[in-house]
Image (cartoon, coloured by chain):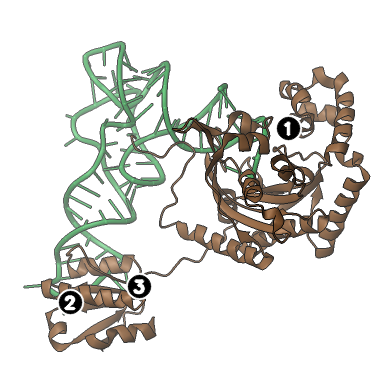
Amino acid sequence: MAVQSPKGTRDILPWEVYKWQYVEKIIAELCRNFGYGEIRTPVFEHTELFQKGVGDATDIVQKEMYTFLDKGGRSITLRPEGTAGIVRSYVEHGMANLAHPMKLYYIITAYRHENVQKGRYREFNQFGIEVFGAPGPSVDVEVISMADMLFKRLGLKGIELNINSLGCPACRREYVQELKEFLTPLLENLCIDCRNRFERNPLRILDCKNEKCRQHLKDAPALLDNLCDECKSHFDGLRERLDNIGIGYYVDKNMVRGLDYYTRTVFEFISPNVGAQATICGGGRYDGLVGLFSDQDVPGIGFALGMERLLMEMENQGIEVPKPDGVDIFIAPIGKTADIFAEKLVYQLRNAGINAEKDVMGRSLKAQMKYADKIEAAYVVVIGDNEIESNKAVLRNMKTGEEKDVSLDSIVNRLKKTG
RNA sequence: GUGGAUAUAGCUUAGAUGGUUAGAGCGCCAGGUUGUGGCCCUGGAGGUCGUGGGUUCGAUUCCCACUAUUCACCCCA
């Protein structure tokens, strides 16, 4: 086929978009309940923003970014995630001077150049939130509970929450040292990927899926057991608070997240039903990120939730999204005079806020009726010469087949009441 | 970047050890009802059988390459 969308992109078509609109509406309500304001930032940013913000060592920056030079020779990148752009906006607009916590949410498309598979696309949609300024575990719980509540409102079941702590730069540095000492004698037994990870990102070795590696790593020290006092009490505080409001979770000592900026709390919501891409929502705290772009030291936390994966999970769980109603009324004219008349009538109906349609293809009455049926019109009015002469027409209820006489003059008012 | 599977109409698909016009269901259009949808009946439109090459008298079918789709690895939403 000559015409098709680029690899990893999809069309959301008119007859399925209602599912997206439904979820988006629930998200907007949720955010309002929690006091989050929407922010919209550009699809593209300067490449350095992501190199610095997401991290030069990450897969995202190393091999997955859509980067190009614009006509002014600037290196531009399509956003591979949402947080960096928002941090940029936060700093650029001096939001640190506004009331805190600063609570923001976004629904965006993001772009990553990688091979596609179930639940993974090159253009994908994310709902995400960010909170700036709150250092304690209280806000961690608010953020986590927000995702949890969204799943509940959508009627999703069986989504599991995993949490972990990656510590602060200080205790992480100490721990990485310890981990490396543990790994050094084992290195030649580990898979090639892990050996490569040893220098670049040794934490990643912990969540390698290779069976052999897992065997060797059974007794590896866990970061969680080596946190400094502050990080430990932060994590304990998070657990207490989750227990307090009744959100269940697992502690996954090996969970590492793929972006460099995370500190302390990290979490994932996972479902077994969305293919190999089990993570529907992932997030964590990024206390050092704002400091990378300004001399202000502002703590932050947020999450990103994959809309495609969310919709897929809803589909899998058989959750029914209410379909929008069809058109209120269809005007079916017969003949030229009636057509001219109907044109004015449908205009008046629409002007009165009624969802009205009329034939524009000059089709037979039968074809018009079929069409009205297909677009699920609630009512049909047939107008021919007789009707125009007598100023009366039949209003047909398409669901029941019941018909009523109405005068053409009163039809707009009448439908206002009915509709 | 690596590996497997797949590719026939708008959609879901049948097909033959290679042989004349490649079938069906759904959908679409029209007619049966010269002014009434859904059910039913009849008819119609719609296919370079993914693309290119090879074998052959002949390829949609066999072989090769490419492309695309899809699943998985890595990684992530």
What shade has chain A been given?
A: brown
Give the CA separation, mark 2 to mark 3: 18 Å
Q: Do the dots labelled 3 and 1 sit on one chain?
A: yes
Front-lying residue, A280 or A61: A61
| Dot in front, 3 or 1 | 3
Mark 1 or mark 3, which is nearer the start of the sequence?
Answer: 1
Amino acid at the residue labelled 2: Phe
Front-lying residue, A233 or B50: A233
Mark 1 or mark 2, which is nearer the start of the sequence?
Answer: 1
Q: Is residue A40 above or below residue A149?
A: above
Residue density around tag 2, few if under 14, some if 14–19, many if 20 or more, within 10 Å: some
Query: Mark 2 = which residue?
Result: A341
| Dot in front, 2 or 1 | 2
Residue A6: give x, y in percent of width and height. 43, 37
Location of the N terminus of chain A (image quadrant): top left
Q: Is residue A359 above or below residue A186?
A: below
* Badge count: 3
For the question of whether residue A29 can be seen, the reply is yes
For the question of whether residue A54 can be seen, the reply is no
Q: Secondary structure at mark 1?
A: loop
Query: Mark 1 = which residue?
Result: A209
Mark 3 or mark 2, which is nearer the start of the sequence?
Answer: 2
Q: Secondary structure at mark 3?
A: loop
Give the CA separation, mark 3 to mark 1: 55 Å
Disc 3: host chain: A
Query: Mark 3 = which residue?
Result: A355
